[in-house]
Amino acid sequence: MFIFGGYMSVPPPNAAGKTNASHAVRWDPRAHCQSALAPFFFEEKSMFCLFRKWHAIAVLSMSLLACQQSPHPGLLQEGGCPPKQSPYLKQAPSIDGRITYCDQGDASTGEIRTTAYPAGTRRVTVMMAGYPDTGGVRILAVATDGSFTSTLKADKIGESWKSVTFQLPEAAQTHAFYLQLVDDATGPFGWAGMGFDRAGLSTTLPAHALPMALAILTAHLWIILAGLLLPRTWTIPARALCAVLALGAASGCVIASYIASPTLGGIIAYGLAALPLLALPLRLRRGPAPIAEAAALHHIFFPSFLLTLLILWIGLYPFSWDGQDWQVAANRWRNLPMDSWLPLTFAEMVSAGRLDVPMIGDWLSSDRPPLQSGLYLLFFHSWLPGGGLIYQALSTWAQALVLVPLLVLVGTLPLRSQRAAIVFALALSPLVLLNGLFVWPKLFAATFCAIFHIALFGPASIARPARWSMAGLAAAMAMLSHGGALFALVGSTAALLLLKRKQALWVLVKTGILAVSAYLPWVGYQRLIDPPGDRLLKWHFAGQVTVTQDSFLHVLRAAYADLGFGQWLAGRAYNLNSLMHGSFGFFGDALALFRSYSPAAITTVVDNSFFYGAYSLWFASPLWLLPCIAYALAKHRNLRLVRFPSDLALATAFSFLLWILVIYEPGQTIIHQGAYFSFLMSMLVVLIMLAQCLPPALYAVVALNVAVAALAYAFDRPFDGASSAIYIGATLALTGGLLASCSLASAEYG
């Protein structure tokens, strides 16, 4: 076999190579091992020199701007009483804080005030305790010049210290300000506390960052060993893709076993976690070749490994978060709900042998697919400790695996530097960065959607049984990760029917049978164990947000009963407009970001990139397709000669068309309501066309996108001197390592 390479939110206001992918090439492990030791910047010198020049400018700009960060003040607080005044509060030696639970207990009143934060601060993270949601207790942001006072919302915390992140209103971001806790409450639970975690990196790195790094390394080694277990007659890219499918299948088996019995689940999890270790004795008996095979698999998975480290570094530094809550990761770049924590909640529920109805809030356990829960439980019984830190690390790594099939999809490009540049740009796109930290499993689903697409459109040398079996398993894993994957799966299926009519029908029939068979156990859980499990169907397809026991078909009929054709058509136009919003507006926002680098400019880019599809492509705008096609025609070429990615383009178009037509609420075709692979495909089509028609523009677009990512997502918050130097140095090192690993991995597909 050969393979080549939901929650509703209101959008913010508008503000010449010879490589041929269709020919199988025998893979020589020894030759590969020799070539792997050679420098990987030796080919396509002229283009890659341009690539390096553009990125040298980008990296230099990142460094200079990062060095201009305002130092974080040594914040202090005054007022209130020492934390030891409360006999109920769990004491934390590293917390420098004050509380309003004084001599009179709950009846005590008073104020706690911090020293000033500098102008330009977008959000602040403090440690809080007590009951700041009680009437009479307020958290205020007060300008030092007295020009404004803004009330900040805080939820109940209880008798322990907890990290809380406050998003500052835009007016506060342009002034120096301080935080003030005002306690006028005299009744029960009428107190709160505020402080700062003084634990240094010497404490937080081994306590919090190291367990996450070990979890990522464990998962990385597991998937490499899983690839070694696969037949040696398969190519390395094929084994990498099938190893990802094996990970998904193992996660599915683990969660199904836990649902049946926690004891059985533990046994299955232990067995599947240890199974790849069989690769070592089995493969090492065959001589030195497995070492080269393992190195090649490592090259392919290493970009995902480094991307995981980069996302966690820029997202959680300085690692004061202990994994006990979901807010820190969810609020890193914008305030998001606890959706990313639901898979962990489900995993903890089934591992304890419970069925909580509802599982949390008004969500049932059957409302969200379970594959990411299974991934966590797969490693839960290893030597790794359980909890939020390990869940976050494994889930971020799972989202970063999307780079593996993306490397295959760019494999048809002849120049290695182009392949590396495109994957690097996709890795640093807002879709990947934000959703790699906020780990609702939509990128995990996109990984399987990409494998599904590759299996359908793979070269003729792929054995047909392998094609449909890979596609069927990938489709099931995608749907078991996130239901929004349906749109991308339908898009790829429709593209196959259009482009390969003669071959498509029988392949799709077998694919569908396998996919449905693998998905049916989850349907059984939804219908029989925790019914009805169709809340998101009612939400997105019928606009029914509140929980109802009515059937999906009843809700759907009621939604469309009084909807006229004119209203429906206007809603579809609104959906299209929402999808394309920002196609032109981004360039003005980017200019403002580069010129002023203000908190408002950063917030505008981050918010719009979260909501709007065309905007989130940044400089890889779909508008580039027009000059690319014009260039091809002007050179008396046709799109076939420039290898237009028709399969990707059609799959993207069909996916978006279905999405626009069936999403009920007008204007809700925003990114997190759809299939993430569709947006990755759209960016991929643009970059592939630039690579073939306007290569210099490709490298310029990649460099500009990297600069936007640096300003808006990496260097958007200040640290003090030593901490800032460590953060900047490690961020640049990880980013450079990611680029180098993309180039090294791209060599496996050349």
Image (tube, grey):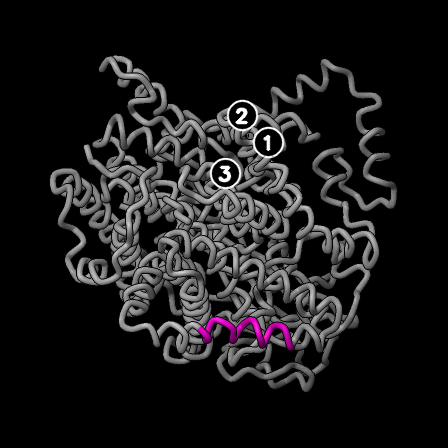
Which circle's residue, 3 or 2, is located before the other in the chain? Answer: 3
Residue flagged by tag 1: what amino acid is it?
Leu
Q: Assess whether residue 273 is covered by the magenta stretch.
A: yes
Which residue has dot 2 on it? 501
Q: Quadrant of residue 525?
A: bottom right
Q: Position of residue 706 (x, y in %)?
A: 31, 44
For mark 3, does the 10 Å Cα neighbourhood hold few (<14), some (14 to 19), or many (20 or more) residues?
many
Under circle 3, the secondary element is helix
Is residue 539 toward the left or the right of residue 711 in the image?
right
Badge nearest the viewer, 3 or 1: 1
Residue at (68, 52) in percent of width and height: 368
Q: Are marks 1 and 2 in contact (CB under 8 Å)?
A: yes
Residue denoted by label 1: 505
Q: Percent x, y for residue 236?
A: 35, 55
**Label 3 belongs to which residue?**
456
Q: Which residues are magenta?
A: 267-278
Residue toward you, 31 or 492: 31
Relative side of 700 to 111, left or right: left
* Residue 252 visible in the displayed image: yes
Secondary structure under tag 2 reads helix
Amino acid type, label 3:
Leu
| Residue at the image position 38 percent from the left and 65 percent from the top | 73
